[in-house]
Amino acid sequence: MDVILLEDVTGLGSSGEIVSIADGYARNYLLPRGLAETATPGRVEEVRRRQQEAEARRQRDAEHADELAETLGKTVLTISAQAGEDGRLFGSITAADVSDAIFEARRARIDKKKIKLAEPIKETGDYMVEIEVNPGKSATTKVIVSAAK
């Protein structure tokens, strides 16, 4: 019997997959628990259409991530902060500050958790900051921290 899995089933498959299994296993275990439904031609077509849409969405997201990574790689951010005579900041520049600067410069929202700073920036100068745009795709942006006048 062919069924469409509604949830991930260990040892059988993941949600949305069409699998062939024994009739008894489907009737006595999967169907009563709501883990699967019978694979009718209409539902099979709907599942395939959803899978194609999901793949197209993943492709668009990957292309967008490539464009964003390229843009961020060319971006130079300047952040002004109050600093003393020796160049030490009164406070620090955090990942949230870098995220806000990216939004002001490129109108792109980057989650502060995706910005890789080993520790907050506490002195004026030039820094290379790594930004994870997508899993497996990152960009490096130059951040110039200057003393506010």
Image: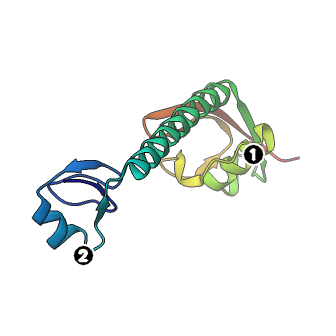
Q: Is residue 93 visible?
A: no
Q: Is residue 100 left or right of residue 96?
A: right
Q: Which residue is identified by label 2?
A: 32
Indicate how the structure is coloured in the image.
rainbow
Residue 63 in the image: above or below residue 5: above
Q: Which residue is at 60% across, 52% downward?
A: 111
Q: Which residue is at 64% across, 32% downward?
A: 68
The percent position of residue 4, horizontal first and vertical second, equals 31, 55
Task: Say what amino acid the circle numbered 2 marks.
Answer: Pro
Q: Is residue 127 left or right of residue 119?
A: right
Alpha carbons under labels 2 and 1: distance apart: 50 Å
Q: Which residue is at 25% across, 75% downward?
A: 33
Task: Say what amino acid the circle numbered 1 marks.
Answer: Phe
The percent position of residue 141, horizontal first and vertical second, equals 62, 32
Q: Which residue is identified by label 1?
A: 103
The percent position of residue 79, horizontal first and vertical second, equals 75, 43
Instruction: Label 2, secondary structure: give it.
Output: loop
Q: Is residue 55 left or right of residue 149?
A: left
Instruction: Label 1, secondary structure: give it.
Output: helix
10 Å crowding of disc 1: few (<14), some (14-19), many (20+): few
Residue situated in front as seen by the camera: 114 or 57: 57
Q: Earlier in the sequence, mark 2 or mark 1?
A: 2
Rendering quarter of residue 70? top right
